[in-house]
Every structure is written in C-alpha cells, then in structure tokens.
Amino acid sequence: RLKAEAEGAGGRAYPQPAWLSSAEGTANAAIVGNSGVGKSLLINRLRGVQRSSPDWAEVGVKETTKEPAMYALPGDGRVRVWDLPGAGTEGFPLETYIQRMGLRYFDSVLIVTAGRFTSTEIQFRAELQKQGVPFLMVRTKVDIDVWNNQQDNSMAPERTLQQIRTEFKLHHGVEDLYLVSSRDPEHYDMPRLRFDAFPGLKTHLDKESLIFSPYESSGGWGDAWALPSAHSELLAGIQGQWRDQHDGTRYIVDGSQAHVTVVDGRAAIVCLEERGEKVWCFQRWSITRDSVAQARRTCELRWAPSDLRLKPLVWRWMS
C-alpha cells in the first residue's frame, strides 16, 4: 500500500511520513487512540512478548510514547506494528494528528478506546473510511467494567460485555467491536483480535485459522535456518516434520517456530509459545510433556484445544 500511495502523489491529501519511507515490502499496522487508553500494553499482548523482552513496549500511567515506535511481529519481521503517540495531547493535537501520523499510508489501523467514543475515534474512523484503509475498533480495559458491574450491580460478565457492544452499535454504528483486556490477554476478544489485526495475514486452521503470509520466491523455504543451540525438553521433543492428519497441512518445527505449508501451497511462519509446562500453537492449542512422550510411541502428536468447541489438532510424524 505504501508504494502505491507514494506513486499516486497527485491525488494524496498529505505526504507520507519520513519514518515510513523504508516500509516497502512490509505490512504495517498502526495503533491509534487517545492518550492513556492502553495502546502500548495492547501491542505487547498482540505480539506475545514478555516484560523481560528487549522488544517490550514501555507502558505507564502517563503517555509513554513520544514518537512513533515500530515493533516487528515475532517470527516475521515483514509484519510491523506501529505504536503511535496518543492523540489530543499538547505535543500531538488532534487537529494535525491524522496528517502528521500519515494514517492513510498504513495497511490497517486499530482504533483503540478505553471508554465511550470521543471526537478522536470518530475522526479516525471517518478518515480511514474515506481513504479505504481497513480498520478495527478495539475497546480496552473491559475487565474493569466487568468487575465494577459485578461488585456494584451483581451483573454477570456476559451481560456487561453485551451492554458495551449494544452501546457502540446503537450510538456509533460499530457492528464488529473487539472487547479486550491486556491484563487478561487469553480472555474476551483478544485471541480473535490477534488473528485479525495484521494486514496480509489470514487465518486458516481447520480451514478457518492458519496464519497466512505468502513468501517471496527468493526467500522462505530456500533460506538457511539458524537453529538455537539448545531447546527446552518440551520443544526439543517436537523438532522435525509433521503433517496434519485431517487436512494435510505440513509443519516443520524449527526451534520455537513452525514453518507451515497448506495443501494449496500457501506458507506461513508460526511462533510456538512456551508458557509454564505447555507449548501453545496459534494461542489456542497446547501440548505437554505427556503429549510428547505419547507421540514418541505412536508418531501422533495431539494438541489439546483451550476451548472445547474446537477440535484437537492431530499431527502425524513424517519420516
């Protein structure tokens, strides 16, 4: 998108920011909103990084993002998330924010609010609709609403969430709203948001959810891979080639990444996240040491879903 916009200079309303000039060949998603809505912590959760990581985006009660900051998606440096300063502050007044941040040049934008819609979010949405830029509406800190309504009104969490959705739909015309809590990243809509947030990536697993990112012909499978010198016992037990028993998708586990190829030739790199005594794939399926021990005997690795409505993933060892 950035290259196309740059070439169409005659029709653009404001120039591409200088800090986006090296973006050719990458996918760029921006996180925007008022100061204090939790943009930086949301970026950390979407990328799955830990507080001890050097890639952790600084968070705080005060506005901590003073300049646009870029963070690559772990496992694929071509997908980049931009933490933009909060709008409506003294340093970044709303009147010039949209032009200064160059919102029309991003591949997608997450519009983030921690409460009701303000003129900030309304202007963001209008600009992105005008420019044809895909955007997602995100309501953060819903865990606070849930807790307050439980304490004050004995209201069930599901009812609180439905109230928020109804308000945004009736008053602002938001049909698809992501309700998230960065303090509780495995609940609410955060897992769904992770899969939908990044441009150029599709989800397709069980024909609906494999993260997809096409490789350039000069890269991907032809490149040499640098293996870490050591893995945990759990990760070490699943290194190698596997095939999905149901749809034939091929997985080559290389360190903490799985190189994935679906039957129609599309490819992706997926990060395997180790938390506690489990390894997670797609944030939704996990294995344990018992799973790996059984796979050594049967050549079949069974990933258990975190949601019982999902089917298990079953990988067969490729000798």
Image (spheres, helix red, strand yellow):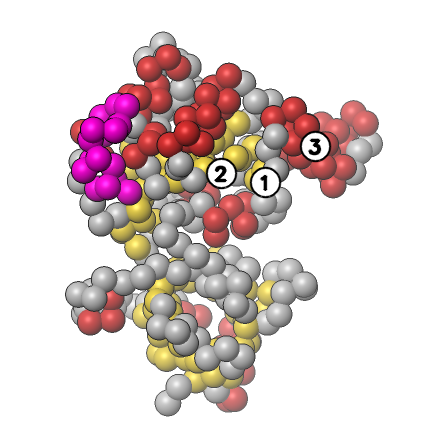
Three-letter amino acid code at the position of disc 1: Asp
Q: Which residue is mark 3?
A: 166
Quarter residue 258 falls in = bottom left
Q: Residue at x 54, y 45 (%)?
A: 190
Crowd around label 3: few <14 · some 14–19 · many ≥20 (10 Å): some
Residue 34 lies, in percent from the top left, at 46, 21
Residue 221 lies, in percent from the top left, at 25, 71
Q: Quadrant of the N terminus?
A: top left
Q: Which residues are magenta?
A: 1-16
Three-letter amino acid code at the position of disc 2: Leu
Crowd around label 2: few <14 · some 14–19 · many ≥20 (10 Å): some
Disc 3/disc 2 C-alpha distance (Å): 17 Å
Image position of 275 with respect to 4: above or below: below
Q: Which residue is mark 1?
A: 176
Crowd around label 1: few <14 · some 14–19 · many ≥20 (10 Å): few
Three-letter amino acid code at the position of disc 3: Thr
Report if the CB atoms under discs 2 and 1 are less than 8 Å apart.
Answer: yes
Tell me, yes or no, whether the highlighted magenta stretch contains residue 12.
Answer: yes
Q: Which residue is mark 2?
A: 136
Q: Earlier in the sequence, mark 3 or mark 1?
A: 3
Disc 3/disc 1 C-alpha distance (Å): 11 Å
Residue 145 lies, in percent from the top left, at 67, 29
